[in-house]
Amino acid sequence: MTVKAILLIWCADKKGIVARVTNFIAQNGGNIENADQHIDEQTKTFFMRIEWSLDEFGLGREEINKSFSVIADEFSMRWELSFSDNISRIAIFVSRQTHCLYDLLFRYRQGRLKCEIPLIIGNHSDAASIASAFNIPFFESIKSPENKNEREVKELEILNEHKIDTIVLARYMQIFSPRIIAPYENRIINIHHSFLPAFIGSKPYEQASRRGVKIIGATSHYLTSELDSGPIIEQDIVRITHRDSLDDMRRRGEDLERIVLGRAVRLHLEKKILVYDNKTVIFE
Amino acid sequence: MTVKAILLIWCADKKGIVARVTNFIAQNGGNIENADQHIDEQTKTFFMRIEWSLDEFGLGREEINKSFSVIADEFSMRWELSFSDNISRIAIFVSRQTHCLYDLLFRYRQGRLKCEIPLIIGNHSDAASIASAFNIPFFESIKSPENKNEREVKELEILNEHKIDTIVLARYMQIFSPRIIAPYENRIINIHHSFLPAFIGSKPYEQASRRGVKIIGATSHYLTSELDSGPIIEQDIVRITHRDSLDDMRRRGEDLERIVLGRAVRLHLEKKILVYDNKTVIFE
Amino acid sequence: MTVKAILLIWCADKKGIVARVTNFIAQNGGNIENADQHIDEQTKTFFMRIEWSLDEFGLGREEINKSFSVIADEFSMRWELSFSDNISRIAIFVSRQTHCLYDLLFRYRQGRLKCEIPLIIGNHSDAASIASAFNIPFFESIKSPENKNEREVKELEILNEHKIDTIVLARYMQIFSPRIIAPYENRIINIHHSFLPAFIGSKPYEQASRRGVKIIGATSHYLTSELDSGPIIEQDIVRITHRDSLDDMRRRGEDLERIVLGRAVRLHLEKKILVYDNKTVIFE
Amino acid sequence: MTVKAILLIWCADKKGIVARVTNFIAQNGGNIENADQHIDEQTKTFFMRIEWSLDEFGLGREEINKSFSVIADEFSMRWELSFSDNISRIAIFVSRQTHCLYDLLFRYRQGRLKCEIPLIIGNHSDAASIASAFNIPFFESIKSPENKNEREVKELEILNEHKIDTIVLARYMQIFSPRIIAPYENRIINIHHSFLPAFIGSKPYEQASRRGVKIIGATSHYLTSELDSGPIIEQDIVRITHRDSLDDMRRRGEDLERIVLGRAVRLHLEKKILVYDNKTVIFE
């Protein structure tokens, strides 16, 4: 398999950025396999994702970093460079409901998610048997208001031990303190069972039923310290009718949540998400 | 064309309601062409819509009313009886944006909406030429905070004059006082350009853009005195990406609003909506 | 849990059917919890699904059968009577691809499918470990043109042994002979990875890619002896773009297939499907 | 308003194309406002759409053409250059059904389609009054098998007279001969009322009803001489149930057709469609 470099760039728009970046790649012998660029017209911000093969590329990985930083400085760019053989290491956090956990593990096992999942952390013991069926270490970390701080310290230790770079909250019902959120900025993916920003908080189906909406949704977003308000990655919806009881809504919602979370994790792993101004640019 | 009777019923659930109602129809020689029934399991409320042909029915319209009221009392039902040859008379209110007005008039002219539209009331003169192209009387009623009361009194007069039973707000940007809302309870259909309850109030696309949602929507609901909070009739959505500017969202939204409002008006005209507890049961 | 009787009826439309049926239930003390009726206007065919509680019902199960058959004869009805505590016994057939198998087993384990799954039959050994993880007996039955007859005889034996009433083909790549199809008429649920009737046969994604469609789909239907032409139960779609490779289409398709098959199996188990004229009436 | 140059390119993939093209623009002082690139992995074909402002661009329009053709030759590119102030001139052909005609004219009048519509040609007189309401010349051209050739010759004359570059078939029920198709290759936009390739030909709703599908669609495509088989531009769908009669399907279909055709025409006018191998690449 050919290794590819993936570069995400954002900065104030100026003339010549695209030419400068693509020249850098061409002059060093790279073949651009994907280039997608966007300018936000309101803020005049430039966004780009560019992907090229390293097969006959003249620079090593460290050299790419060094050389590109010169260009980046020139245009005051913010940028992220990654390589397609850099496999993410994911920890999944889960509470009682296991449909999202199960679905992620299934996608992982089918080879549909390019990552390692070396750790599952559960706020209940329910998920232990699933973790074991998939041969993944399970760490039980049951939280109460009293032990939350201590638990989080321990969780961080284990995350570090397992070299986790990305956290997925698969219907995890605890609220993280900044202790965990800060070091994993834009790397904690959550799934919320409503069409955000409608029905923020808990019990969105109860809220939806009370309001009498005709469509319910699910939203995957990056976790921030403000509840259910982080950058939205993906959303989808399903129609309901008055015939759908709360339990029907939960059942339909489970299917939605699984699909939406699966898509969001894949987009993250493929470096197709650029976070900017509490929103996402999705290069797909 | 065969004339049909349409009966909407709701009450606390009891044994034997369906049999009692269908017997009443059968014993008088009616053929049931459509029957749809639902029980809300949380509140144990019974809902039904039943439609039968009057072709060989033994009772006249007034007699149906009288005879059925006996059954209704027995079960403490709330009910609405209507006849398929009773053609609704609609007034459309409109401000500057005319896409919904245009669309309704087009559906009307194509025979897709069984109603009369004898009156268009505009808060700007922009719609006058459209009204004239469709040969519909246009009443200009430009409102300011100062003249609002006086204007509404005049509007009510004209509504009465034209025997209007249903009002459609086709992107009408004024807020009605209870003076108009009360006599038209559950008979004023509004279209809101967001997926309610997200982005209540004005400028929903600006709000959606700021929040970075991946899907926008439109919602048609019955107007109540609480802003954007009346019973939802119909909703639909369309996906957007970061490439969609505010103007793109408006353009996509216009298509949504036209479709959603068109569906809601049709459901209303076909007596397929039952309002209960600030929600709707849609019999379709 | 209250046991319910579920009655599916279809026949030429006549006056008084609904009243006759609901009377039968009311006079024997049943409370109708759900009634849905439809008349096909082209063929003047009457369809009904009615569900009532047996809690205080005056007739035993055998008596219901006997008494109702008198009414049925009167109107020349076709009908199916079932009871909510009658748990279906499902056998899943599977080939190499396991995403649908996995998904069904997961729904089953979560309590989302009211059935027993006592048997999995595989045309490859790949599914054996999944069957074992869910503690379900796995029967390997690898078919070739030479042994097909003999294999099918054996499969029928095992189906009978396990008292299987419903077969689900979870991406099963073999074609059944009438030997199996006939005894399981309208009880073999298949999933096809296209929006039927587009792209009948094998390799629908290749066909879709060649034709350049902008939307792909999945279809669940009852198996008949004519390839991919049985009564359609459920369909859904997902948008694609030129960026989606064949493998992307397969990945998106897998999610669709899982959802669509899951919905179809649930509708079947809840007796919400009436098959008529190679089409389905779905009471939902 | 800033004028923009839009360049569509496709060719066998080679190293350095993106850099070469973007350099050409940058070195002449152009600011790239949009760049989207794609490689078809199966055929190794390169596709690109690039858009830049001419505000301070060093080359005139003719010079761009001449200079770029050197680059194009170097990579054996096929390419199309256009300018945002080049307004398309559209003729709409229509038969009896006018919902698509109406919708296009409404979009046009609302400023949602950047084009001129100087001509409507009708196979029936029904559309004449609509054309007149929008002040657009209407040419009645009623075809029979006998006069088809003669009619087409006349139509071509009128198309030329009005300098028409794009034809939109708004539910036009006649089949063009190559006489008209050839000179307007990839510039005749048709709308078909099914989810192609399902239900090719006439009466797709009848076909859909017979097959019992749960979803109906509409497809906009470029006309080719093979019936309903040209490059697909846009498709969309809507769910139906057994309750939907043929007339309900037509009504729902009309809404779909209007939306899908409106989107396709806009994509065409904004030069966002590249036709390749009887398929489209949509840059959006």
Image (cartoon, coloured by chain):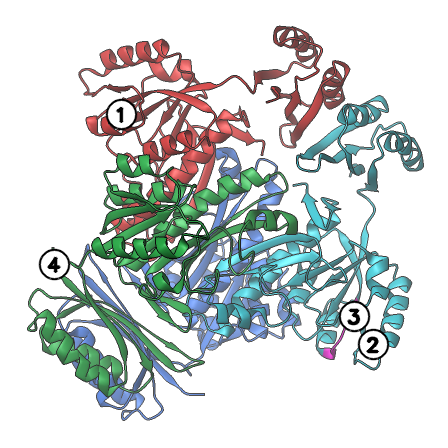
Chain colours: A blue, B red, C cyan, D green
What residue do we see at 93% from left, 34% from top?
A: C66
Inspect the magenta stretch and tell me whether residue B124 lies in it. Answer: no
Q: Which residue is mark 3?
A: C121
Q: Which residue is mark 4?
A: D2
Q: Amino acid at mark 3?
A: Ile
Looking at the image, can residue D251 be seen? Answer: yes
Q: What distance separates the C-alpha of mark 1 from that of mark 2?
A: 74 Å
Q: Amino acid at mark 1?
A: Ser
Q: What distance separates the C-alpha of mark 1 from that of mark 4?
A: 37 Å
Q: What distance separates the C-alpha of mark 4 from that of mark 2?
A: 70 Å
**Chain at tag 1:** B
Q: Up-down: is A208 above or below C26? A: below
Q: Residues within 10 Å of mark 2 (few under 14, many from 20)?
A: some
The x and y percentages for residue A201 are 45, 45
Q: Nearer the viewer, residue C133 or B182?
A: B182
The x and y percentages for residue C126 are 70, 77
Q: Which residues are magenta?
A: C120-125
The x and y percentages for residue B43 are 62, 28
**Discs 1 and 3 carry the same chain letter:** no
Q: In the displayed image of the protein, which residue is found farthest to the front?
A: D146
Q: Up-down: is D102 above or below C163? A: above
Q: What distance separates the C-alpha of mark 1 from that of mark 3?
A: 70 Å
**Chain at tag 3:** C
Label 1 or label 3, whichever lies nearer to me, is 1
- Numbered tag placed on residue C148 in the rendering: 2
Q: Nearer the viewer, residue B16 or D65?
A: D65
Q: Amino acid at mark 2?
A: Lys
The x and y percentages for residue B145 are 19, 20
Label 3 or label 2, whichever lies nearer to me, is 2
Label 1 or label 4, whichever lies nearer to me, is 1
Q: Secondary structure at mark 3?
A: strand
Q: Residues within 10 Å of mark 3 (few under 14, many from 20)?
A: many
